[in-house]
Amino acid sequence: MQKNIFSLCVTRLFWLGLFLAVSFHADAESLDEPTAGSASRGYDLLTKTPFLPPDFTEEMFDSAWQVWPKPLRENAAKASPTERRQMAMERYGLTTRPGDASLEPLQYVVSGSEPNKTWTMNCFSCHGGSVYGTITPGAPNNRFALQTMTEELRSAKLKLGKPLSRMDLGAMFIPLGTTHGTTNAVVFGIGLMSRRDPQLNLIDAMPKPAVHHDMDAPPWWHFYKRPHIYIDGFAERGHRGLMQFTLVPENGPEFYREHEDDFKDVYAYLMSLRPPKFTGTVDHDLASTGEHLFNDTCARCHGTYGENKSYPDLRIPINEIGTDPVRLTALPVAGRQKYAISWFAHHGEAGEQQTVVNPDGYVAPPLDGIWASPPYLHNGSVPTLWHLLKPEQRPTIWRRAGEQMDSEKVGFEIEVVSRVPLTQSDIAIRRQYFDTQKFGKSNEGHLFPNELTDDEKSAVLEYLKTL
């Protein structure tokens, strides 16, 4: 029983963190390499095909409001079913699909027919958010509230007399994310792999204890530049690696051979994505100055952009970059080695992938569309680009205060507080606060901007809008 609960729960978590903090290597020619597979079919598969057992029914989701805090519950009771659905989706960080008026979420596959529709999590739960209010598949879902949603759906199921799922039970022991918009996910793929042999047959083994920590989801529009996945760049990019999220006991080794071509199409979809263009005001003279400064001081790690684009694929030692080390140390060498000898890495086949089992730091990400993907650093601890460039000004405890972009600082509009308001009765509100004093949430490091003057930082900030 405990094994099954843990396996399904960590699978859900790994789905969320599948691409958290990836690394990459590319030269000017390879950045736009063609990809086999159908991108449009890949999107359809993500939104229409459940590759996992369902998480809950539509009835359960639409009943969640009955367990909300009293003031919100009273407002929901007066609302129409459509309005209540919209309230629930907003509370849990879900969006509709672009161009779809059905109120079905981008982040879940809705299957079946009334009255037995089921909802199954997909990759868009973490990688299908909005860019300052504009629904954008591939953007980080910086409002996703999985822990809150799971707790409230569990209560709603008990109220309805419905059975609990393994996810409901497992989430009582494994945190799903302590701050909305981040997720405790990336280490769970290693846990799931511990119950498989190299050919993905199930074996009788308990996953080893994991170091729980929250991560920020990177944008998918970087994927085409990234030959390696994860912030430490330990695994090569590939369509098989995208299938790790499906390692539930119900999916035997035959599942992976049967669906491999499907994930070639999913891979093609990810490879097709590009960042949105900045639509605000840009001081082009200042941005031009910023470009020169960027190329002199930042391009060594983050690459160049425009006509002569390049990507250096540099892994920066942790003692040099100085950012929170928990993510790096949380994945053991043995766990990475388990992946290295698996079917996912094409072990023993032509084209076997190379896996870095003991990386010493984090790989600097590309910055395409950087203005559109706050918060920043791999754990989401920095709310704006202005704060990223001014390390001494980074807030200790903050929360997002609005949907619109802070046009001056480029990132979230935020509220800064001295402490998380523990007297706030609504747990969903408390989880909106990001406390950088907590384990794995430090906003320290990446002090390289201190080489620049304030005027130079302003110029670089202006240039970052154009990427």
Image (tube, rainbow, N blue to C red):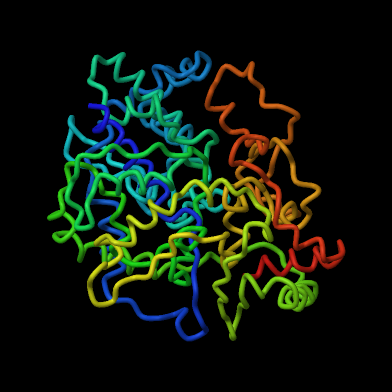
Q: Is residue 378 positioned above or below 237 on the image? A: above
Q: Position of residue 430 (x, y in %)?
A: 59, 26
Q: Is residue 463 left or right of residue 171?
A: right
Dividing the image into 4 quarters, which one contains the C terminus?
A: bottom right
Residue at the spot 49% in from the left edge and 51% down from the top edge? 217
Of residues 396 and 445, the one nearer the viewer is 445
Q: Is residue 85 positioned above or below 296 on the image? A: above
Q: Is residue 150 left or right of residue 290?
A: left
Q: How many numbered marks, from 0 up?
A: 0
Q: Position of residue 366 (x, y in %)?
A: 57, 68
Residue at the spot 20% in from the left edge and 39% down from the top edge? 204
Q: Position of residue 261 (x, y in %)?
A: 20, 66
Of residues 215 and 111, the one nearer the viewer is 215
Residue at the spot 41% in from the left edge and 17% down from the top edge? 67
Q: Is residue 295 positioned above or below 52 on the image? A: below
Q: Is residue 368 left or right of residue 210?
A: right
Residue at the spot 26% in from the left edge and 32% down from the top edge? 3
* Extreme-front residue of the structure: 334
Residue 256 falls in image quadrant: bottom left
Dividing the image into 4 quarters, which one contains the N terminus?
A: top left
Residue 298 falls in image quadrant: bottom right
Of residues 391 and 353, the one nearer the viewer is 353
Q: Position of residue 96 (x, y in %)?
A: 39, 45
Residue 317 falls in image quadrant: bottom right
